[in-house]
Amino acid sequence: MAAASATQAYTEPRRSHEARDPTTRLDGRGRAHVSSRPVNPSHALTTTVAARIPYANAAPFYALWADAPFAVRNLVPRELGREAEAGAVDMGLMAAADYLRLAEQFELVAPLGVSARGAVQSVLLFSRRPVSALESAVISVSPETSTSIRLCKLLLRARRGFSSVRYVRGLEPAQADALLLIGDQAMRTRNRPPEGFVHTIDLGADWLEWTGLPFVYAVWAVRRALDPALKAELRAFLEASLAAGLASLPDVARRETGPGWPAHEVESYLRRFQYRFGPDEMRGLERFEALLREHELLHLD
């Protein structure tokens, strides 16, 4: 399938009778617990390699992954995309830009991923200057990002017309006019930016102001060549694990110590995200793809 169809409407696949069956029960205190009952996981499932992004914003997906019936790798977004392209990953929480770039090889497991409408507090541009004064700036870019670097280029080039901004990965703050950080590192830096970086731009808020749409940061993608029954098993496990995470979000938040935030702030942060996509999220992804193609950024980072 051509890459141009990456964001076409998602079609619900027929469920395999071998897939895991997510079930919900209540304990004696009325709290919901969701489990996934393995029905003799296939050999193909146990040899599948799945990758997850080890950021707090993805934590609700991983509630059942301690017992995952497949091999698991923790990879930051850019490395996950590279490993998927090299054939070393069969399924993963893939950066949206990499999913769009690799659409001939990968498809959505289900309309699941990490999306938000507006500010997210973990995709941040810390700057010495106001955003309106960033023409000709040197921006230090996190080595981990694949999607946010492209989003930043769109917001500065396509939205504001800045044509001479330089993007360099991994510069020290002293060498840069602005820093693009993502994930837990951005969260840790939010309250203590380097000296002189007095302006903070939340890229999710800037995108919403520009387009009126949510932004999709990552999607659950699976290799197209896998057997449909195996894809159904993977989908059912993902859905069960997400249901378990959302049903116990305060516990999930307490376990996320990487950002250095109090548990109640982490929980509020997680509630900003939409993990199951609807029409608005898909329109946001379509708009992102169209802009990347228009500005020739899809295959460049």
Image (tube, rainbow, N blue to C red):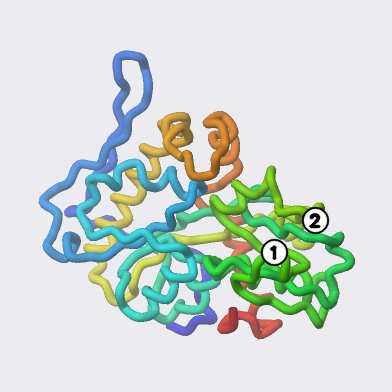
Can you tell which quarter of the image residue 18 is in? Answer: bottom left
User: Which residue is depicted at the point 54% across and 50% down?
Assistant: 184
**Residue 196 badge:** 2
Q: Position of residue 254 (x, y in %)?
A: 46, 32
How many badges with numbers are in the image?
A: 2
**39 or 10: nearer the viewer:** 39
- Which quarter shows the C terminus? bottom right
Query: Are discs 2 and 1 less than 8 Å apart at CB?
Result: yes
Secondary structure of the residue carrying numbered label 1:
helix
Residue type for callout 1: Pro
- On screen, residue 223 versus residue 128, left or right, reads left
For image coordinates 38% across by 58% down, the residue present is: 52
The N terminus is located in which quarter? bottom left
| Residue type at tag 2 | Gly
Q: How far across and how far down the image is residue 205, in percent?
A: 73, 53
Q: Which mark is residue 173?
A: 1
The residue under the point 32% across, 70% down is 89
Left of 102 or right of it: where is 280? right
Label 2 or label 1, whichever comes before in sequence order: 1
Q: Residue 266, which numbered label?
A: none
Q: Is residue 287 visible?
A: no
List x then y, in percent, for residue 67.
22, 46
Q: Is residue 185 visible?
A: yes
Image check: 55 left or right of 297? Answer: left
Q: With respect to residue 46, does 224 lie above or below?
A: below
83 w.r.t. 30: above or below? below
Furthest residue toward top: 28
Q: Residue at horizontal 57%, vertical 37%?
A: 261
**Can you say whether 131 is above or below 54 in the image?**
below
Q: Where in the figure is residue 282, as x and y percent of width and height?
A: 57, 61
CA separation in Å, label 2 and label 1:
9 Å
